[in-house]
Image: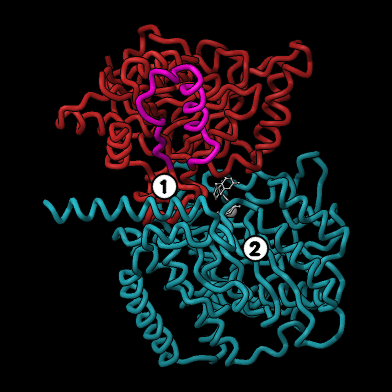
Chain colours: A cyan, B red
Amino acid sequence: MTVETAAGASQPEPELVQLLTPEGQRVPHDHYDALIADITGDDVRSLYRDLVLGRRVDGEAVALQRQGELGLWASLLGQEAAQVGSARALRAQDHIFPTYREHAVALCRGVDPVRLLALFRGVDQGSWDPVETNFHLYTIVIGAQTLHATGYAMGVQRDGAIGTGDPDRDAAVIAYFGDGATSQGDVNEAFIWASVVNAPVVFFCQNNQWAISEPLERQTRVPLYRRAAGFGFPGVRVDGNDVLACLAVTREALQRARDGEGPTLVEAFTYRMGAHTTTDDPTRYRLNAELEHWKLKDPIERVKAYMVRGDLADQDFFDAVEEEAEELAVHLRAACRALPDPTPTSIFDHVYVEPTPDLLAQREAMTTYLDSLAEEEVAR
Amino acid sequence: MTSLNIIKAINIGLRRSLERDDKVLIMGEDVGKLGGVFRVTDGLQKDFGEDRVIDTPLAESGIIGTAVGLALRGYRPVCEIQFDGFVFPGYDQIVSQVAKMHFRSGGRLRLPIVIRIPYGGRIGAVEHHSESPEAYFAHTPGLKVVTCSNPLDAYWMIQQAIELDDPVVFFEPKGRYYTKGEVDVDGEPELPLESARVALPGADATVVAYGPSVKTCLDAAAAAADDGRSLEVIDLRSLSPLDLRAVYDSVRRTGRLVVVHEAQRSLGIGAEVAARVTEECFYSLEAPVQRVTGYDTPYPPARVEEEFLPDLDRVLDAVDRTFAY
Ligand SMILES: Cc1ncc(C[n+]2csc(CCOP(=O)(O)OP(=O)(O)O)c2C)c(N)n1
Ligand SMILES: [Mg+2]
């Protein structure tokens, strides 16, 4: 099959790495089977669990936003496999640079989801420890983190933490970003830098087909993974709703990076099933039929079907995961509501390593002022 | 007269400009089918087509940079930056290219570009969605910087900005987007673009504000009036050039000045106003000029933004300070 390109030339239909069909059938792959040959039934069950918990965290957050407990939420619905598959390919020493939507990556990485809620509640701007978790702060300015990831990878390279063959030492960096982000100068500069210096970085693009209301055609006339060729490194398109394929493809890309072979662009072909964020109304710009079409490719259903088909899990297992998800949800609801508001003077705390005299004076003035309001309150 | 909010007022203003001059283009992220995340461009692509109302790739440097080229070719691009905090990928194009082209070309090249930026806080948003970067632009010679505070001004100022042959950065007070007001869409603008306006005459102290802070100051003036104190509120509207004639006139009568903005305090618009008033009205001043502003920190998490932003009480507190001398 061929597709028309902008130039009118025919090009082969983009190859999509897929190991699990939407119906849950395991399809063999000449190259990528080897990359998940070690995956046991336990591993599949554990991947399934992460997918379900990821979706549950997300669903709870959407509900909390509706109830006024969060200012905003960016839903990952539909992108669970891309996130869990790629995150589970990471080793402890690998470093992650997310956007604002990588909640399931955070979960796989051991970041307490309450910390994510805190950010979207407006309590703080990222309260997990990026050093301890190797999970950097969320970046909202589109594309900026791809350069940070590249620079971090340059540091890894300088520290000799690639190409030693020691699986506990060699490290890779992964940058998450969206299809829209590929238009940003920063992302293109990151590609150039990573290529020129052969940085150990994986560019993981979740092509969810939309950048708010703009469809992919507003950003590109060629399949995104093909852009890599022009920058001088490999690009691969993977079924982003197939957790096994995402795991396999990301494993390979990360290992190339750890081995000192340089960057890879992974395009996870997926779909944003929800609104862009809780303030968005997708009915204004896309057809419901499209959503229905992608529902048939649901990333969780296909794993479940695969497990049932292969006798990898019984109803007790699915029930247990459901129960765990329910417990997590109960915990999140309570923990979110219990998050304390920051104190007003806390805004002065971390502007600089040491507060400047100006800031100390402003903090003092704020305190005096707030005290005077409180006194007036009491007097009334 | 029609009752409009600021969003609708700008929307109709843009529509008029598109009708009046077929060189006018609208470009930005999500401005087409969606009508912008705030719906300011709602319905415009439907009526004027994808050639004139353009959903651009997600790249602010590209939005501004291509607007420069389009302007050189005779078009009048109106660029939308989705939120204040996202103008910076385009900042280089704005300060290094847009601002200087006319000067460098000895006046041969004009760039009639308008860059619309929703700005300011109080919308409970996450980072980069509540900033007040106006001073960065007002500090750059070659750019005109204006901001509206109400639907009537919004309606006329956007059209005047589009008609101007200089580049204009047009700041829209998103926290006041839903404020309603009466607009005679078929009338004439009462004021030129680059002029301040006395929003409320008063006798005892002068309060200068712009954009979202004007409402805060009008509320403060109402509260002060209850206490028998009469505040004159001046809406600057234009930040570059600054039109301070009304301010000088007012301060010569009141002897007291408070400047209010959401933007951080140091080296900002308030500092410039204070300096100029000190230069022009030194002998009239009864007290040092007071500033009520955001603090010198990054814009804080939403749950403390109320404490960060100037409010009625802080304005009145500052007014009190001018009477303490
Ligand atoms: C520099 C910049 N410009 C604009 C925005 C506003 N914005 C937030 S998300 C978004 C779309 C992003 O699309 P994509 O990269 O595909 O990621 P997705 O949201 O689909 O995950 C836009 C335009 C921003 N955050 N940063
Ligand atoms: Mg997208």
In the image, residue B236 sits, relative to residue B293, either above or below, namely above
Q: What is the three-letter code of the residue carrying label 1? A: Asp
- Viewer-nearest residue: A232 or A117: A117
Some atom of ligand 1 lies within 8 Å of the CB belonging to the residue at label 2: no
Specify the label residue A84 is tagged with. Answer: none
Q: Residues within 10 Å of mark 2 (few under 14, many from 20)?
A: many
CA distance separating discs 2 and 1: 24 Å
Position of residue A67 measured from the top left corner of the image (x, y, whole percent)? 29, 60
- In the visual, does B191 lie left or right of A35? left
- Viewer-nearest residue: B38 or B61: B61
- As for residue B286 lying within the magenta part, the answer is yes
Residue contact at pointers 2 and 1, CB within 8 angstroms = no
Q: Tell me the chain of label 1.
A: A
Specify the label residue A281 is tagged with. Answer: 1
Q: Residues within 10 Å of mark 1 (few under 14, many from 20)?
A: some
Position of residue A59 measured from the top left corner of the image (x, y, whole percent)? 40, 67
- As for residue B121 lying within the magenta part, the answer is no
Magenta range is: B265-293
Q: Are marks 2 and 1 on the same chain?
A: yes
Q: Secondary structure at mark 1?
A: loop
Residue at the disc numbered 2: A176
Residue B14 visible to the viewer: no
Residue B321 visible to the viewer: yes
Quick one: label 2 or label 1, which is nearer the N terminus?
2
